[in-house]
Image (cartoon, rainbow, N blue to C red):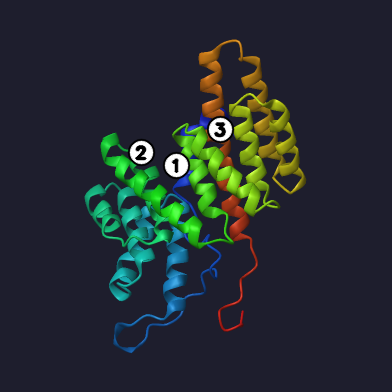
């Protein structure tokens, strides 16, 4: 089913607040394990509980996520991921002060851009001042750029950078991230899809159509391809009205970037389990 343009805000919350924390090529979450004597936690147990909390958040059930994460944070206080997710769950549940305090205390680690991005999306649904949002967005973008430098085999940071740029209608930043994606990951359909959006924003419809066809050939779902073509047709039909054209292109890019992240998230979750560092599954 193609995404409806009128559902832009709904999809922004539902998708961008559900960015996959583990979308960095690391081993997917393991099944829950057992507590160790003395209150210590096995890594498998932590990963399993985090996985359950993420499922609850994706289902827009922050209360359930809080029930899982509060005891987990007490049991494994060294888990930045658990503390960050608890902060997000609290904010989704209306406790902005405690939630922000947990997120603010996270160390400046590149992978934290996922948590900060989700924080921005949650806070955007409140009446909080834009000046409060800006530091979170800037920090998320900075850490995403650091992650892009370190995680050379993972396109996710670049996809995040491009999506945030689309939210801000920052086409130059979106173009830079897309060019890196095309250079480093030529067989990733997401890069070609983003290249089509950038070309469309510049009314380069020949490049738009070619890049969209390549994304389709590489496996981009048909509903997202169809939505992109619909938005392109709307923009071209309105090109004599510059203001309307700008609105259509900006809104269309954001909607399609959100659809892209929804696809990216589903693709990651369906990925076969990666081997652990010692060579076992």
Which residue is at a point 37% across and 53% down the rendered structure image?
A: 62
Q: Secondary structure at mark 1?
A: helix
Residue 12 horizontal side relative to residue 206, left or right: left
Quick one: quadrant of the N terminus?
A: top right
Which residue is at a point 63% across and 54% down the rendered structure image?
A: 184
Residue 139 can be seen, yes or no: yes
Read off the residue under disc 1: 13
Q: Position of residue 225 (x, y in %)?
A: 69, 37
Residue 269 horizontal side relative to residue 99, left or right: right
Task: Name which of mark 1 and mark 3 comes first in the sequence.
Answer: 1
Q: Position of residue 209 (x, y in %)?
A: 73, 32
Picture layout, residue 25 above or below residue 2: below
Q: Residue furthest right?
A: 217
Q: Position of residue 132 (x, y in %)?
A: 26, 40
Quick one: quadrant of the C terminus?
A: bottom right
Picture layout, residue 225 above or below residue 156: above
User: What crowding class fits label 1: few (fewer than 14 Cα within 10 Å), some (14-19), or many (20 or more)?
Assistant: some
Read off the residue under disc 3: 253
Cβ atoms at labels 2 and 3 below 8 Å apart: no
Read off the residue under disc 2: 124
């Amino acid at each position: 089913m193609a995404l409806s343009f009128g559902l832009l805000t709904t999809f922004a919350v539902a998708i961008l607040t559900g960015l996959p924390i583990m979308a960095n090529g690391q081993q997917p979450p393991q099944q829950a394990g057992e507590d160790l004597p003395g209150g210590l936690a096995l890594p498998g147990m932590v990963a399993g509980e985090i996985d359950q909390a993420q499922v609850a958040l994706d289902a827009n059930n922050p209360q359930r996520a809080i029930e899982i994460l509060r005891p987990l944070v007490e049991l494994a206080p060294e888990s930045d991921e658990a503390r960050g997710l608890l902060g997000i769950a609290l904010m989704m549940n209306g406790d902005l002060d405690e939630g922000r305090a947990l997120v603010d205390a996270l160390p400046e680690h590149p992978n934290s851009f996922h948590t900060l991005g989700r924080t921005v999306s949650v806070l955007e649904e409140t009446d909080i001042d834009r000046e409060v949002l800006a530091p979170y967005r800037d920090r998320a973008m900075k850490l995403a750029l650091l992650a892009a430098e370190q995680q050379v085999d993972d396109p996710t940071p670049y996809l995040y950078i491009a999506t945030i740029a689309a939210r801000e209608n920052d086409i130059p930043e979106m173009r830079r991230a897309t060019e890196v994606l095309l250079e480093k990951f030529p067989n990733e359909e997401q890069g070609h899809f983003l290249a089509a959006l950038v070309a469309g924003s510049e009314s380069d419809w020949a490049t738009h159509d070619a890049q969209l066809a390549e994304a389709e050939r590489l496996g981009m779902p048909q509903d997202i391809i169809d939505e992109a073509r619909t938005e392109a047709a709307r923009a071209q039909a309105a090109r004599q009205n510059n203001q309307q054209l700008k609105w259509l292109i900006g809104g269309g890019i954001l909607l399609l970037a959100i659809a892209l992240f929804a696809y990216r998230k589903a693709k990651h979750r369906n990925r076969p389990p990666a081997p652990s560092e010692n060579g076992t599954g």
